[in-house]
Amino acid sequence: MPCQTGYEHTAIERETMSTYHAVVWIDHQEAHVLMFDREHVMAQRIKSRSHHKHQGKSNDLSQLFEETAQALLGTHEVLLTGSGKARDEFRDWCKTHHTAVFQTIAASIASDHPTDAQVVAMAKQYFKKFDQMTVDPSHS
């Protein structure tokens, strides 16, 4: 998977990388799952296989939602963002189908079509208010 620092992450790195925070930009066609720590960003794009892209039927979105929820397993805090209703539909779907992921969703914020870097910057700003993510307690 491509990462913001310009190299590829392997499955082993995914397991060892801190995935405390994630942000998901989602619409009815795709989800951008971005997991990050202070120094790294791991990006994953999940495409909908639905042929009914503009109907927004929940049964058409179940595959997209399932793959997105699977990508978020093990994350502690998730910020949802996107335009339209997909982010709220995903949150509601998780409440029924993936309660562990639902419990990690901190907020759902509307946004247009930002770049992945803009989405991560927004999420870092959001989470910084709550946990001082930029402060490393080992350097105190």
Image (cartoon, rainbow, N blue to C red):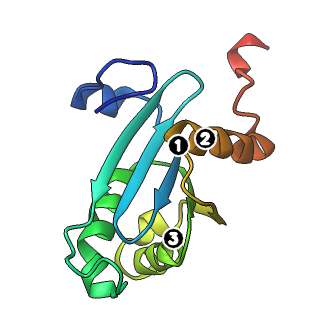
Write down the residue under mark 2: 118
User: Of the residues tagged 2 and 3, which is closer to the observer?
Assistant: 2
Write down the residue under mark 1: 115
Write down the residue under mark 3: 87
Does residue 140 lie above or below 25 as drawn?
A: above
> Which sits in the foreground, 17 or 90?
90
Quarter of the C terminus within the rendering? top right
Q: Marks 1/2: CA distance?
A: 5 Å
Other residues around mark 3 within 10 Å, as few (<14) / some (14–19) / many (≥20) = many
Q: Find residue 4 and report its image quarter.
A: top left
Q: What kind of element bears circle 1?
A: loop
Horizontal relation, residue 54 to residue 84: left or right: left
* Residue 105 x, y percent position in the rendering: 56, 62
Q: Amino acid at mark 1?
A: Thr
Q: Find residue 3 and report its image quarter.
A: top left
Q: Are marks 3 and 1 in contact (CB under 8 Å)?
A: no
Q: Marks 3/1: CA distance?
A: 17 Å
Q: Amino acid at mark 3?
A: Arg
Other residues around mark 1 within 10 Å, as few (<14) / some (14–19) / many (≥20) = few
Q: On residue 38, which mark appears?
A: none
Residue at the image point whose x is 39% and y is 39% from the top: 43
Q: What kind of element bears circle 2?
A: helix
* Residue 77 x, y percent position in the rendering: 57, 52
Q: Amino acid at mark 2?
A: Gln
Residue at the image point whose x is 69% and y is 33% from the top: 133
